[in-house]
Amino acid sequence: MAKDKVKESEIAVHWQEEELIVPNDDFVKQANMADPEVLERFDQANWPDCFVEYADLLDWDQRWHTTIDTTNPPFYNWWVGGKLNASYNCVDRHLKAHRNKAALIWVPEPEEESHQVITYQELWVRVNEFAAVLRDDCGLRAGDKVTLHMPMVLGLPITMLACARLGVVHSQVFGGFSGEACGDRIVDSDSRVLITSDAYYRAGKLLNHQVKAGLSVNHAKGQGSVVDKVLIWRRYPGKVSSDAAMTDGRDFYVDELLKSKKGVRVEPESLPSESPLFLMYTSGTTARPKGCQHSTGGYMSYVAGTTKYYQDIHPEDVYWCFADIGWITGHSYIVYGPLANAATAVVYEGAPTYPDAGRPWRIAEQLGVNIFHTAPTTIRMLRKTGPDEPAKYNFQFKHMTTVGEPIEPEVWRWYYEYIGKGKAVIVDTYWQTETGGFIGTTLPALQPMKPGSCGPGALGIEPVVLSDDGTSLSAGSAGNLCMKNPWPGRMQTIYGDPDRFVETYFAKFAKKESKDWKDWPYVTGDGATLSEDGYIRILGRVDDVINVAGHRLGTKELESAALTVEAVGEAAAVPAYDELKGRVPELYISLKPGFDQSGVDIEVKNAIEKMIGPIARPSHIWVTTDLPKTSSGKIMRRVIAAISNFMDPGDTTTLSNPEIVDPITKQVHEAKKAMGEVTEDERRKLEVEVRRFGED
Ligand code: PRX
């Protein structure tokens, strides 16, 4: 260990404790959960049966006989013996009381196009008809996997619910990802059907999305996976918006297939609670993304319960979550959670600041949105580009959410004062693709808010901060954030790779021989402190993952893409502070002998965009003569991450090539200063993350 390495606990105490802010009375009076006894009901003494309160929000075809089966940790089954259908729970059961109520309101990006309202009745019709396409035209059955690569169009939630109706496991890949990235996920998930769209609007442009389908299919084929059907939802049904060629017998327009399904109804499959509902791929420490597998009963109960208590959605509210359905936030808190609660959810197609920073507030005013849910990156962007915009519009939120990355207290306050107009309650919800739903947040009517801190563990969840040797740390000390006990929304496994599941989330602290779930804490991969009052403050990732604008990218994914460029000999990706996105990746590369550096930076950026997607595009490519390495030849990302963020790289004498640190520092700092990037003040925000980053 480096001689002058600052202890993490010492870093953590630099953080100042923020004041607590209580929710206003109007909110508390109407809240779904304002009864303090709920905290006792969900006390650890009542685990696991406390979660029955969530499972009872669903309609079960058959009630479970066992709350949780923990005989094979860390693989658990919730509501064992229970049977249900997620599509039935999100649609059919609401018809009696809410048939004519808006389920989804889709807002196209072009302001001249009017929004589309889908009632529960209409949603039911469309889900049934599309389920008939999947069943009859594609031959899909319960347990089959399909890959979705769709933007924010109504076809996406309809497709998810149609899959769920049949018990077909959907794996939605974020629409902004490249064809290659989608192809890799097709292979990993064993999908033989791809469901996509022809085009969508983003920042004023109608993007040609269908071209990616051919790339995905070919990329999958190169790895031995055959896609035999590609279904294409058209942005304008009946009209061609993409010039991508259609392959006969493989590619079909959904609007054409639906013509023969008018009035067809498909009975929802009654599925065992532990049947997988969907896969959601996320980045990890290797280049291969992990397919997080979520269950039907456990997941649905957890998102139904947390949506009701934490998002505080009542049937008459208008709820708008600005996330993309292609990420877990959209799955849990646009589609499954809100629809299970018979809510009205807004689905917006496009960019937050298109055509200007007033757009979200015009949508809120027009639709009467009163619950708003977004990520710090969007809040920072709206604050920067249009700080005075919200005041111009007549909307009033009762409740707002922030999710996906740590929010700086000053950004939190702007959100509270200018967007919430000092009245809306804020929940800073901490969770992950793996966790299915919120695991750290305040219960809005009962627990005060603290800017920059997400709050205590969610109901029934017990967070703990462990040092690297597994001891539980006291308040204020930074360490590994873990969750002691299982909860119903947690993923079941990594699809096709149970060993990796154990290795990634448990191996660090588990007593591997033990069959007692208490010996298997869930390791989040985040660094955090717990304060005296039990509130969690997330400090950033402690593994090789970079959180860019709330999206996770694995350093190895970025590096492998860079290494496809012929001239690149070595590559290392690190997170750098960014005013808007929180973090952006920077790449350090060294060239193979005999190669010239001209144009390499552009080639690397293009390779990353092609293999992953534009969100992964690095802000800088630093071409250096060599990279700092340990005596065993490992690249020390921690050292270059420190350089990128104007921090002290610490002791470099143990490197095999310490002499290169100074020239790289000079090269990067001079270039960055010339571009006006990163101030002294900002670097502290990254301190813990960078210090631990990339240390094998
Ligand atoms: O580092 C944490 C950060 O985002 C990671 C999870 O990313 P993903 O699986 O893409 O899910 C994002 C949406 C749930 C976490 O490990 N993160 C998420 N929420 C917060 C957060 N960091 C701080 N505060 C949050 N509220």
Image (tube, rainbow, N blue to C red):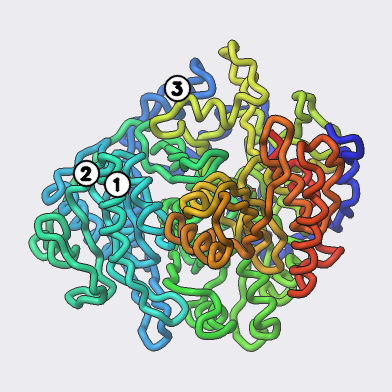
The answer to whether residue 159 is left or right of residue 475 is: left
Percent from the top left, x then y, of residue 565?
Answer: 48, 54
Q: Nearer the viewer, mark 3 or mark 1?
A: 1
Contact between marks 3 and 1 (CB within 8 A): the answer is no
Quarter of the image for the C terminus: give it.
top right
Quarter of the image for the N terminus: give it.
top right
Number of residues whose C-alpha sits closer than 10 Å to that of mark 3, classed few (under 14), some (14–19) or many (20 or more)? few
SS at circle 2: loop
**Residue underneath mark 3:** 66
Contact between marks 2 and 1 (CB within 8 A): the answer is yes
**Residue underneath mark 2:** 226
Residue 252 bears which disc, if any? none
**Residue underneath mark 1:** 220
Residue 138 to residue 81: above or below: below
388 or 566: nearer the eye?
566
> Please, what is the three-letter code of the amino acid marked with disc 1?
Ala
134 or 669: nearer the eye?
669
The answer to whether residue 256 is left or right of residue 465 is: left
**CA–CA distance in space, label 2 to label 1:** 7 Å
Residue 593 to residue 679: above or below: above
Residue positioned most to the front = 594
Contact between marks 2 and 3 (CB within 8 A): the answer is no
Look at 90% across and 42% down and name the residue there: 10
Q: Residue 43: name its quadrant.
A: top right
